[in-house]
Image (cartoon, grey):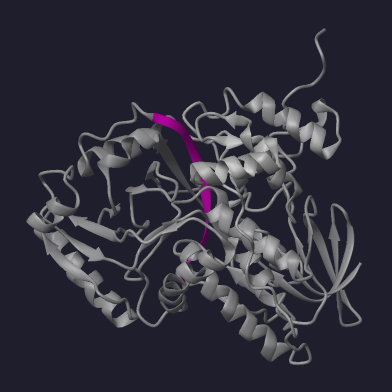
């Protein structure tokens, strides 16, 4: 197949960029090596919308962070994605920390972050009653928040498809050749031809760039491990809580999630260049999370942890700490979007617009479509409806009255909708990310088998071909009787 533009990578940045480019009258495809959208960093991160006081003044990261934070509510509304503007607190435990807060405040002010304030111990305790007695103050940034990153990526992808974009899953790129003004991308699903390429491959972005002779950067996978706590713990924390930052990042944080759980983490361990699939948790890493959290909220424990997980951040090797978003010097028709670590999620809406500007300057022949569908319809969420609305819905379709996931109150109708969506679920984890079936306290212990049955029926495949997350992650193999 021949396209005008191929976007490599279906994380949140790839998805948002694809949506942005779908505003133009062109043939567009997004290529993803996994069985679903948001399978890399976008499904395993802190899910925070950062205010923008961390990035160095004048950096692209600072500019796009602040812009992205201001745009996030707008895009989440357009795409029907959970978002909460809860604000963040960087907590100080010493007078040296208080000096660091002054530095962060000044940096944030210069970056254009609005309404920040350094608050006293008394103000901090009013906002966070369970905070450690050793905390003496904090930097309050009211523009921070939390979002569901994988839902944002999925929603942006669906909206892009509504506007004519194509998405090819299980299509990892393993070779690129450029000839006759055209890129020939060899993928697991065949050769894709494209006039322009946008490289959004996350921790693999350096390997993709190398395929066109661009060796200008290398990606170090930086592992972060987390605990996710049950919703019973949400009373313990009201805002995003940070330690004062270090050279390795913002340290262990505690935050409510967009869905009402509590998230603790991450660690920050740099892995070898060839460890870009290592998302195993470790005893040492999780112990680090537990011990650091006790310094912030001593009463918060992992007794009500429902799962732990790890994710990888795409950290640029060397002295460059900024995002790399530019045409490649090896080929000006190839745009690198690389090193998108924190605050990459926050910046994603602004990154999409920034890449859109680069592309329009690079290829002015492509004009805006006369009609662009900007809104993705909100999925039905039965547990958010009134009693009267639920009853009316069930009258129309009884499947919305059949609870599959008891922990989260997810119905069969919602699961079927997720499978039948424009970029629908193909595996158990895909259903989980779209509906939250399996994200509750039992982590799919009760509903998992039912989800497998529904996927088998709706995709018209044998039950032993249903997977957890694609590839060889089969749930069942054969009948025993």
- Left or right: 39 with respect to 116? right
Q: In screen coordinates, is 70 left or right of 196?
A: left
Q: Residue at x 73, y 81 (%)?
A: 371
* Residue at figure coordinates x 87%, y 78% from the top left: 182
Q: Residue at x 37, y 57 (%)?
A: 249
- Considering every residue shown, the one lying at the far top of the view is 481
- The quarter holding residue 303 reads top left
Most common SS among magenta residues: strand
172 relative to 113, above or below: above
Image height of 92 relative to 409, above or below? below
Q: Which residues are magenta?
A: 305-320
Residue 456 among those drawn in magenta: no
Q: Is residue 298 above or below residue 39?
A: above
In this image, 428 relative to 303: left or right?
A: right
Can residue 278 be seen here? The reply is: no
Q: Quadrant of residue 479?
A: top right
Give residue 352's position: percent from left, percent from top: 59, 74
Q: Nearer the viewer, residue 259 or 275?
A: 259
In the rendered image, residue 179, in percent from the top left (x then y), is placed at 89, 78
Q: Is residue 404 visible?
A: yes
In which image quadrant can residue 333 be found?
bottom right
Q: Quadrant of the C terminus?
A: top right
Q: Can you say which quadrant of the picture contains the N terminus?
A: bottom right
Q: Position of residue 108 (x, y in %)?
A: 29, 75
Nearer to the camera, 201 or 169: 169
Residue 61 in the image, given as x and y percentages of width and height: 45, 74
């Amino acid at each position: 197949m021949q396209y005008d533009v191929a976007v490599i990578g279906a994380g949140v940045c790839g998805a948002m960029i694809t949506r942005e480019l779908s505003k133009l009258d062109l043939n567009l495809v997004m290529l993803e090596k996994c069985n679903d959208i948001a399978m890399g960093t976008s499904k395993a991160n802190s899910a925070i919308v950062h205010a923008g006081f961390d990035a160095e003044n004048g950096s692209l990261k600072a500019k796009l962070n602040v812009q992205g934070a201001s745009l996030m509510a707008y895009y989440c509304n357009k795409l029907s994605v959970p978002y909460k503007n809860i604000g963040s607190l960087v907590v100080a435990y010493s007078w040296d920390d208080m000096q660091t807060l002054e530095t962060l405040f000044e940096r944030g002010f210069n970056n254009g972050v609005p309404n920040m304030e350094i608050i006293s111990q008394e103000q901090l305790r009013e906002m966070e009653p369970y905070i450690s007695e050793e905390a003496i103050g904090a930097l309050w940034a009211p523009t921070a928040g939390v979002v569901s990153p994988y839902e944002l990526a999925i929603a942006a992808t669906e909206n892009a498809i509504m506007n004519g974009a194509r998405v090819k899953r299980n299509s990892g790129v393993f070779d690129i050749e450029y000839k006759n003004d055209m890129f020939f991308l060899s993928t697991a699903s065949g050769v894709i031809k494209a006039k322009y390429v946008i490289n959004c491959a996350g921790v693999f972005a350096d390997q993709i760039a190398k395929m066109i002779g661009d060796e200008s950067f290398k990606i170090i996978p930086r592992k972060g491990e987390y605990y996710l706590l049950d919703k019973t713990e949400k009373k313990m924390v009201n805002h995003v809580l940070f330690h004062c930052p270090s050279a390795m990042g913002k340290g262990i944080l505690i935050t409510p999630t967009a869905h009402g759980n509590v998230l603790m983490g991450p660690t920050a361990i740099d892995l070898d260049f060839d460890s870009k699939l290592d998302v195993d948790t470790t005893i040492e890493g999780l112990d680090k999370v537990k011990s650091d959290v006790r310094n912030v909220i001593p009463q918060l424990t992992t007794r009500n942890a429902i799962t732990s997980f790890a994710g990888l951040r795409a950290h640029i090797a060397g002295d460059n700490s900024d995002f790399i978003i530019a045409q490649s010097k090896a080929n000006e028709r190839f745009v690198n979007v690389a090193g998108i670590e924190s605050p990459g999620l926050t910046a994603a809406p602004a990154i999409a617009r920034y890449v859109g500007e680069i592309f329009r300057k690079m290829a002015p022949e492509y004009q805006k479509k006369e009609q662009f569908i900007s809104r993705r319809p909100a999925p039905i969420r039965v547990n958010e409806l009134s009693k009267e609305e639920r009853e009316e819905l069930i009258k129309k379709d009884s499947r919305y009255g059949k609870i599959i996931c008891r922990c989260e109150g997810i119905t069969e109708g919602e699961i079927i909708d997720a499978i039948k969506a424009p970029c629908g679920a193909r595996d158990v984890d895909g259903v989980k990310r779209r509906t939250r079936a399996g994200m509750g306290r039992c982590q799919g212990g009760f509903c998992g088998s039912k989800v497998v049955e529904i996927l088998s029926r709706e995709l018209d495949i044998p039950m032993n071909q249903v997977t957890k997350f694609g590839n060889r992650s089969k749930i069942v193999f054969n009948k025993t009787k």
